[in-house]
Image: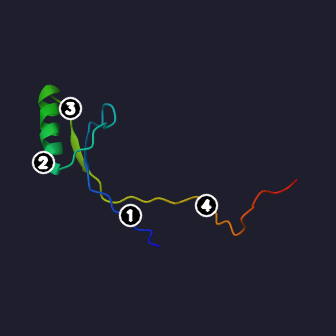
Amino acid sequence: MSNKLTYAPFWFVWNPDNRNPTHRHQSEASATTEAERLARLHPGETFVVLESVCARRVDDMLRIEMRQDCEIPF
């Protein structure tokens, strides 16, 4: 069993002085275009293009039942 999961990369546009990103862009070009659009709408504000690089996840517990009836009778 493999623990490796594959996800498509994505990009966010982030304004460090405003709210958090809400849209995942499917390409760097799309995110860059959106950053430029937002910068024109909000002169003096900075819009950063962020790229997903990797992700980590820990699964809490793997339960393996060995008996058919696992209910405790009391």
Q: CA distance from mark 4 to mark 3?
A: 45 Å
Is label 1 or label 2 in front?
A: 1
Q: CA distance from mark 2 to mark 4?
A: 40 Å
Q: CA distance from mark 1 to mark 2?
A: 25 Å
Q: Is there CB contact under 8 Å for labels 1 and 4?
A: no
Rendered view: 21 above or below 40: below
Mark 4 sits on what residue? 61
Amino acid type for the residue under numbered disc 1: Leu
Q: CA distance from mark 2 to mark 3?
A: 20 Å
Q: Counting residues from the N terminus, which is met first, the one under dot 2 or under dot 3? A: 2
Q: Counting residues from the N terminus, which is met first, the one under dot 2 or under dot 4? A: 2
Q: Which mark is residue 5?
A: 1
Mark 2 sits on what residue? 29
For the point 67% across and 65% down, which residue is it?
A: 65
Q: Counting residues from the N terminus, which is met first, the one under dot 4 or under dot 3? A: 3
Given the current orientation, which residue lies at the most extreme bottom position? 1
Q: Position of residue 49 (x, y in %)?
A: 22, 46
Amino acid type for the residue under numbered disc 3: Glu
Q: CA distance from mark 1 to mark 3?
A: 36 Å
Question: Secondary structure under badge 2?
Answer: helix
The crowding category of the residue bearing disc 3, from other C-alpha atoms within 10 Å (few below 14, some 14 to 19, many at least 20), is few
